């Protein structure tokens, strides 16, 4: 193998308060053609910044202060804008973490797919569209011949993430930067995407930098792993050595995370009135049915985890509960009282009692508003507080989410880490003083150390405020950590539900068993062995639905 990418003593700085502060502190990196490097570390370690620097690119307010980045003999630090344009999208591609924030909502998916190949002269428009359909099929997108002609908002988050992966592969680049590409995917879809990525890398001898906080995922993808901490390289080794014998204490601490599991609460006493009751709900988008006779209860102080594949109906059920999507049949009851189906017909107290914390804090917080104002708006709306009383309430909420008010009140979201932004999302939900909160994949975009902190915070707040949670997630480790009950959904139906202990104890419904067996393990051979167990002759078969 020949060297494709060589980074030497790279140092990057970010501008804040008229000062340049270090982000990356003299890191080296060498990548051979066809090799995959895993970059891991907690939030703020510099993983994404280093991945972008490998493309000769920095975000606004960030600069390369010294060091070199050489791609196939080309100096990317000093290359002209024209040279970089000729490489980016053609020989170097990037898959972002948040597809929802990366696609242009005004253009169809296929239009954004063929833009790169046609502009770089790799394919004609017709050839690129045909190739796009083939890639959609490999990535197991539904209706591959049709889905590209939808707008981004017309597909699920997991489907959109796969469409972005296809777009990055469109020119068959030499190097792809995968920045947390599977964090939004359920475990079964994740397997298909991981298998497809491995196949593409092997088939086209593509090199890749795979940025992730999921150690089990990186074990399946990487030939070697580099660990970062606050811009410093902690250690680098081949994957098997890193997993079996890490040398540094920090790396060992990453291996040991997810130790948190809150005690299981006693089963609900018969006859207790649920805080939220979903009763025989059917729902549709236009004329397309999406929910079928969905029923479950959520009681005071308890957490019900709703799990299932992308498109199973988890978030649609949440939209019905909040009144954003009125059910076609069935009803939603709160404390035994049936709620108006449409949120516009609910009074302020009914609206206040059910709040949401969203998956992607990046897109959920107004980037132009200060943290204090983001939290203050719902406080003022629901309580009418103003002046000093309003500020005192906001400060109390910041204290509750374990952020110092004097340090964060006037900051903008762009000045916060992913975990801090998610805490602001929690504070905004608490501002209405609700009894019930829907947590929609709130830890999926976070590294494991930060995610554990968020779960501990949510558990503490639940105990203190007697909150009830509906926890939408595809992460079964999260379910084990925080849930009291589990509802499993598939194709808009509830296929199994019950107390957590019973749900994790065989025998399972066949679909529940599929979900449980699809959780990646810290074993480099896990994905290969799983595909073989499921009768897949080669990796590519997994991506076209032969599993």
Image (cartoon, rainbow, N blue to C red):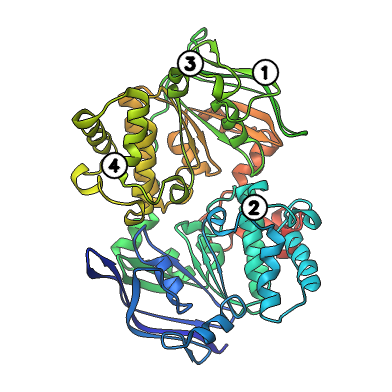
Q: Are marks 2 and 4 in contact (CB under 8 Å)?
A: no
Q: Nearer the viewer, mark 3 or mark 1?
A: 1
- Is 270 drawn above or below residue 151 in the view shown? above
Q: Are marks 4 and 1 in contact (CB under 8 Å)?
A: no
In this rendering, position of residue 65 left or right of residue 299: left
Residue, disc 1: 330
Q: Nearer the viewer, mark 2 or mark 1?
A: 2
Residue, disc 4: 372
Mark 2 neighbour class, 10 Å CA radius: few under 14, some 14 to 19, many 20 or more: many
Between the C-alphas of marks 4 and 1, the distance is 39 Å
Q: Nearer the viewer, mark 4 or mark 1?
A: 4
Between the C-alphas of marks 3 and 2, the distance is 41 Å
In this rendering, position of residue 446 left or right of residue 386: right
Specify the label residue 152 is tagged with: 2
Q: Earlier in the sequence, mark 2 or mark 4?
A: 2
Q: Residue at x 35, y 51 (%)?
A: 413
Residue, disc 3: 268
- Is 334 drawn above or below residue 24 in the view shown? above
Between the C-alphas of marks 2 and 4, the distance is 31 Å
Q: Secondary structure at mark 4?
A: helix
Q: Secondary structure at mark 1?
A: strand
Between the C-alphas of marks 4 and 3, the distance is 38 Å
């Amino acid at each position: 193998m020949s060297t494709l990418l060589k980074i030497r003593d790279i140092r990057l700085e970010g501008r804040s308060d008229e000062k340049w502060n270090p982000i990356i502190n003299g890191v080296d990196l060498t990548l051979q053609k066809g090799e995959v490097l895993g970059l891991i570390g907690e939030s703020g370690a510099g993983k994404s910044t280093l991945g972008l620097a490998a493309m000769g690119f920095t975000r606004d307010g960030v600069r390369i202060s010294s060091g070199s980045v050489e791609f196939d003999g080309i100096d990317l630090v000093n290359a002209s804008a024209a040279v970089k344009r000729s490489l980016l999208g053609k020989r170097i591609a990037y898959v972002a973490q948040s597809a929802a924030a990366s696609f242009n909502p005004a253009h169809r998916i296929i239009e954004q797919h063929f833009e790169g190949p046609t502009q770089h002269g790799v394919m004609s428009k017709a050839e690129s569209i045909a190739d796009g359909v083939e890639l959609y099929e490999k990535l197991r997108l539904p209706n591959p011949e049709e889905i590209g002609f939808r707008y981004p908002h017309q597909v699920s988050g997991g489907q959109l993430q796969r469409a972005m992966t296809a777009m990055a592969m469109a020119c068959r680049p030499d190097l792809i930067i995968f920045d947390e590409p599977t964090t939004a995917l359920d475990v079964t879809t994740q397997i298909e995407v991981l298998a497809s990525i491995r196949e593409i890398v092997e088939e086209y001898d593509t090199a890749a930098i795979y940025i992730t906080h999921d150690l089990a995922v990186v074990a399946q993808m990487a030939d070697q792993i580099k660990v970062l901490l606050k811009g410093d390289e902690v250690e680098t080794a081949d994957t098997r050595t890193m997993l079996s014998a890490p040398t540094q204490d920090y790396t060992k601490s990453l291996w040991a995370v997810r130790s948190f599991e809150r005690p299981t609460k006693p089963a609900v006493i018969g006859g207790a009135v649920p805080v939220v009751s979903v009763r025989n709900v059917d729902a549709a988008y236009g004329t397309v049915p999406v929910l079928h006779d969905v029923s479950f209860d959520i009681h005071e102080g308890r957490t019900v985890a709703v799990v299932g594949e992308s498109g199973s109906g988890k978030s649609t059920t949440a939209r019905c509960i909040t009144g954003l999507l009125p059910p076609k049949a069935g009803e939603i009851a709160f404390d035994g009282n049936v709620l108006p189906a449409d949120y516009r017909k609910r009074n302020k107290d009914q609206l206040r009692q059910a709040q949401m914390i969203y998956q992607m804090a990046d897109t959920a917080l107004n980037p132009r508003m200060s943290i204090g104002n983001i939290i203050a708006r719902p406080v003022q709306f629901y309580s009418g507080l103003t002046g000093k009383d309003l500020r005192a309430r906001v400060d109390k909420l910041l204290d509750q989410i374990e952020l110092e008010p004097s340090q964060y009140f006037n900051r903008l979201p762009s000045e916060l880490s992913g975990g801090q932004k998610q805490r602001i999302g929690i504070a905004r939900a608490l501002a209405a003083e609700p009894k019930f909160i829907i947590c929609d994949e709130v830890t999926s975009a976070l590294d494991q150390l930060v995610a554990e902190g968020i779960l501990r915070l949510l558990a503490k707040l639940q105990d203190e405020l007697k909150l009830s949670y509906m926890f939408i997630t595809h992460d079964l480790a999260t379910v084990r950590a925080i849930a009291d009950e589990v509802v499993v959904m598939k194709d808009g139906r509830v296929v199994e539900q019950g107390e957590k202990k019973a749900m994790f104890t065989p025998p399972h419904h066949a679909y529940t068993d599929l979900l449980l067996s699809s959780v990646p393990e810290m074993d480099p051979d896990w994905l290969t062995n799983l595909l073989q167990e499921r009768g897949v002759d080669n990796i590519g078969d997994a991506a076209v639905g032969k599993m």
